Amino acid sequence: MSNQKVRIYELSRELNLDNKDILAVCDQLDIAVKNHSSTITESEAEKIRKKAVSISTSTPVKPKRPAPPPQSSPSPRKSSSPPKPMKKDRPRKQQILEIRKRSSKSDEFVGSASTSSASTDDSVAKPPAPKPVRPQVSPPVKPKSPGSRVSASSPEPTETRATPPPIYSKPAPQLLRKPAVKGPGAPSKSEDSASPERPTQPKPPVPTLMSQPRRPQKPAPVSAKTADTESEASSSGADGMELDSTVAVLEPKPIPRLVNRHKRPKSKVDDDDSLEDKLGKSSKAAKQKRRSKKTVDDDDEDLLTTDDGTQATVDVSRSLVRPPKPKTAATKQSRPMVTATRSSNRKGRRRGSRNRDRQQQQQQQAIEERPTLLTLATDLTVQELALELKLPETEVIKTLFIKGIAANINQTLDIETAEMVAQELGYEVETVEEESMARKVTEMIDVEDLENLQRRPPVVTIMGHVDHGKTTLLDSIRETKVAQGEAGGITQHIGAYHVDLTHNDEVQQVVFLDTPGHEAFTAMRARGTRVTDIAILVVAADDGVRPQTVEAISHARAAKVPIIVAINKIDKEGAQLDRVRQELTEYELVAEDWGGETIMVPVSALKGENLDALLEMVLLVAEVEDLHANPNRPAKGTVIEAHLDKARGPVASFLIQNGTLKVGDTLVAGSVLGKVRAMIDDRGERVQQAGPSFAVEVLGLSDVPAAGDEFEVFGDDKSARSVANDRSDQQRQTRLQQAMASRRVSLNAFSDQAREGELKELNLILKADVQGSVEAILGSLGQLPQDEVQVRVLLSAPGEISETDVDLAAASSAVIIGFNTSLATGARQAADKAGVDIREYSIIYNLLEDIEGAMEGLLEPELVEEPLGQVEVRAVFPAGRGAVAGCYVQSGKLVRNCRIRVHRNGEVVREGILDSLKRMKEDAREVNAGYECGVGLDGFKDWKEGDAIESFQLVTKRRTLSPASSSS
Ligand SMILES: Nc1nc2c(ncn2[C@@H]2O[C@H](COP(=O)(O)OP(=O)(O)OP(=O)(O)O)[C@@H](O)[C@H]2O)c(=O)[nH]1
């Protein structure tokens, strides 16, 4: 017996087991066999029988197997598992899983797994001639298989490799590839291990087959769903019943199909893929996912590429194994790098990592090279600003967005906005404009003027803290009473005044610019400095150096203008000259008599004391400054002030800094074209011409220019018009952009935040009589606390309130503020129609007060308790499941639905809403002091005699912006 040889297939038939099962047992028992045709000794067979019996009793599989058909081989289903599918401790059910896998891998096997497996079984049942197995999976033979699942599920099972039927589109590459690969002797790992017959197969070289798997590659990923459907169909069909039930007992999921297909261990990824396939993800999505999951699949790749060496297989299989991945920005960004990785594999990854390193280095370098000071000369786009700041554009866009401006990289930012962004990002900013303004006086003179230069009067600015006596000083000098006529007691416009002085028996002229001293007029004062030759700093002797004194010193210094200090109000009792001198030394202004170089003149503007000495000093300094201009040329200068006069139209005060302005001259001021119709000097007298350093009011302009604009006379109308048009277009563009940006912000970005309570805003459109007022108001608005409510000025300009302003206000829920200006025809009707609020003011304080009020109105009201009364519980009555407190209202009242707090022994035992209030058993709306009542509180029955009830109600209270007053 021991010498008797037994073939494996005989043994498997005897035991009613698969060949592979027997082979696996052999493996476990370390019996050397090659395939089912191998022979073993009887003793070895006996061992196998024993082992097989023990396995078969441990698994429900066997009973589930149908009786083999007459011609069926006991082992029709070949395991697709590797040669060692069953480890010693592996349960039998694992084996069955593999059978199931095999079934799904090759549809022939699915079909042949049970009833119609004749050909398959036959092929395996003839041990000496295993070759018939080969045609079974080979496409040309496949259709001939009568019970083939392929035939059953596909209307065109004989489809060639080049055009697989749709239902097969997914698994087709594998089905078609396998025979092709097997044939030429390039078997896949799976096939290799799955077919014990393989070593007996011839290996004819079929080079063309190498490319064949590529044919079905295209449709493969697309038809993931189809493949699944088909597989599902196969398992749900009659043929699949047995397998399904087997699987149901042993392993609930059909996932093994995928595992088997690729010979990969089951993983989470597979689960996802299976799901993905079911969802019918497109091949594009699958490809995308492939890119990002390359590393995970390295093993797969090895496995699959050794299969037939084609990428097609990889693609097909990967389309199955990609987990769904959300399309995030990060994914998009990393796409190029991932693509590179995909194409060049690990090298590419290394390159990608080098690129990242380089990028990091560049970023680091950029940070190191990042400037701390930014010089702005002109408007620039977001992109250009980012470049200047050496920051990503997104940083700039983000900063703008936070500030309420939605901008793209091509959006042009004006200097102010760019400055704001840069400062916000921690840069120091200097605008070239400031520099050039300070040098403007000299720039006014051209080279051609040099031969015709003549001495010109000095232009003097009086600066200083509010109420230190600037206007009074100028008033005294001019011997007029300007201060008395000012609206609200504040100087609101820059005025220019000529003063004739007799000095050394010679009449000399000095031009004074009357700049306001209120804090709100900082910007205007700065402009005054730009055109000035000498600054008189007024410091009240009884008040000393104050914030705006310091500011004025800074402005004068920035413009490199000599400072003469007028220590004013020396007539007052509290005047302390030395204290002022002392304080000024802190700002490097040391009086001459203290050994310094600063001229300081004690004066009394009110009493006119020592003014001559002051003026003498002005002339002295002017002499030193050596001020010259060429009066024999067309005029050039600066617009000091401009406004729209109802009767006279646009009126502008020009300071002529070079040349002579004459009536009839054609000029351009900013972007405004004009022909001088009339000129009026500061005394109200018409003049025909005005020379250097003179200030005149000019009529004949087509529009109101902006204060600070330069003006220039042109020889011919044509060139003047051309320059004006160009500038006008430029300005209109900028203004439009600003307006559009504002609208966008209001309508989109900020509204969301406002709605969410993160930020509230008060949109304003500001129109004022003159540019100076506009700037003053803007400056004051900027001072308002805006932590909770933000003031956004969508548009600010001098001029009338127009219908366009109303449109903008309506579109952006803005309030229109008019300051000393009027409404254009139709504006009022438009505002009424659109429900736009137009508010008009002539005094800045009133305006600010109203704005502040409006902002407070926008603040979330706070809920505060308003006490109602005090009640005592005198008795407790049970009522239903609860209790009613018999009370006496000691003070105030009880109101139904008011809030009550029950106090007992100094503690609050309950707080809630009074939901039942009765008086003499009748429902009462309220019960006043001195009356008894019954009180019920929902869910509270623990009343005690002697309880004190405090009644109150919550009321909303308007909050104010001031932190002190906001807490009630
Ligand atoms: N006693 C005394 N009072 C003065 C003198 N100069 C000005 N005042 C008073 O100081 C107050 C303020 O004077 P203004 O000339 O309006 O001061 P200002 O600096 O022009 O003020 P703003 O235009 O608001 O910036 C007025 O009541 C003046 O009468 C002075 O020399 N002596």
Image (tube, rainbow, N blue to C red):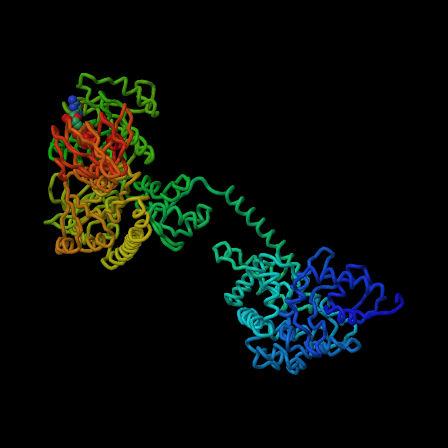
For the N terminus, the image quarter is bottom right
State whether residue 702 is above or below residue 557: below
Please give left or right for residue 810 compared with residue 330 in the image.
left
- Residue furthest to the right in view is 3
Of residue 338 and residue 193, the one placed in the foreground of this image is 193
Whether residue 157 can be seen here: yes
Of residue 720 and residue 950, the one placed in the foreground of this image is 950
Please give left or right for residue 806 compared with residue 34 in the image.
left
State whether residue 320 is above or below residue 419: below
Q: Quarter of the picture for ligand 1?
A: top left
Q: Tell me what residue is drawn at x 32 percent, y 50 percent.
A: 752
Of residue 732 and residue 886, the one placed in the foreground of this image is 886
Which x, y percent locates residue 126?
76, 77
Which x, y percent locates residue 691?
21, 43
Please give left or right for residue 271 compared with residue 646 in the image.
right
Please give left or right for residue 475 compared with residue 168 in the image.
left
State whether residue 331 is above or below residue 141: above
Whether residue 512 can be seen here: no
For the C terminus, the image quarter is top left
Q: Tell me what residue is drawn at x 66 percent, y 59 percent.
A: 299
State whether residue 665 is above or below residue 193: above
Which x, y percent locates residue 182?
72, 73
Of residue 853 and residue 568, the one placed in the foreground of this image is 853
Which x, y percent locates residue 333?
50, 56
Quarter occupied by residue 913? top left
Q: Tell me what residue is drawn at x 69 percent, y 69 percent.
A: 308
